[in-house]
């Protein structure tokens, strides 16, 4: 059986130098939920008319990182759209399914619950109310 060549000093040093850099990518994906609350509105914010959200549907307000849903009775719910996996802003809503472009996590816009990993933590629920036919979300909304 022929002898395997041993790793050269250069090969070993390249591997050692690359190890800390490889770990940097993993740090961006953890820990779940740490900065989701920081990205939620810190004061009440007016999003739009209640009529913009169909009963049984949802609307994504990208500029405020908020999704608002409305049940069949007209009750509003709001969630931060900062993904709880890696804190990426969610920018895709199809029906009531939110999809994060970073790693593919999916959430239910009506409950905030995780529908598909890698996220395991639900979206942060926000206070929401209707004020003269306008949707207001955020603390003390």
Image: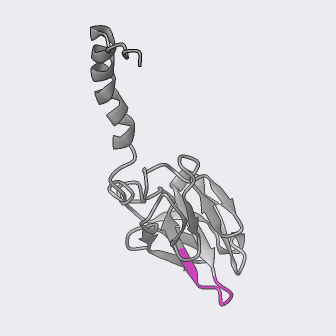
The one nearer the camera, 104 or 50, is 104
Q: Can residue 100 be found in the magenta stretch?
A: no
Q: Please state the horizontal and vertical placement of residue 115, each as a whole percent of the image.
A: 56, 69
Q: Please state the horizontal and vertical placement of residue 92, each as a whole percent of the image.
A: 64, 55
Quarter assignment of residue 36: bottom left
Residue 15 position (above or below residue 85): above
Screen quadrant of the N terminus: top left
Q: Please state the horizontal and vertical placement of residue 23, each as a whole percent of the image.
A: 33, 35
Main SS of the magenta part reads: loop
Q: Residue at x 48, y 57 (%)?
A: 118
Q: Residue at x 66, y 60 (%)?
A: 93
Screen quadrant of the C terminus: bottom left
- Highlighted range, magenta: 71-77
Residue 126 position (above or below residue 23): below
Q: Please state the horizontal and vertical placement of residue 95, each as a whole percent of the image.
A: 71, 68
Quarter assignment of residue 97: bottom right
């Amino acid at each position: 059986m022929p002898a395997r060549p041993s790793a050269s000093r250069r090969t070993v040093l390249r591997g050692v130098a690359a190890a800390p850099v490889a770990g940097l990518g993993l740090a961006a994906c953890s820990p779940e939920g740490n900065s989701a609350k920081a990205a939620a509105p810190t004061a009440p914010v007016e999003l739009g008319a209640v009529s913009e959200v169909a009963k049984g549907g949802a609307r994504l307000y990208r500029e405020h990182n908020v999704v608002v849903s409305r049940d069949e009775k007209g009750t509003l719910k709001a969630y931060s759209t900062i993904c709880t996996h890696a804190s990426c802003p969610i920018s895709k809503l199809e029906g009531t399914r939110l999809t994060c472009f970073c790693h593919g996590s999916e959430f239910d816009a009506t409950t905030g619950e995780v529908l598909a990993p890698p996220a395991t933590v639900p979206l942060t629920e926000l206070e929401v109310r209707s004020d003269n036919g306008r949707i207001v979300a955020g603390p003390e909304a």
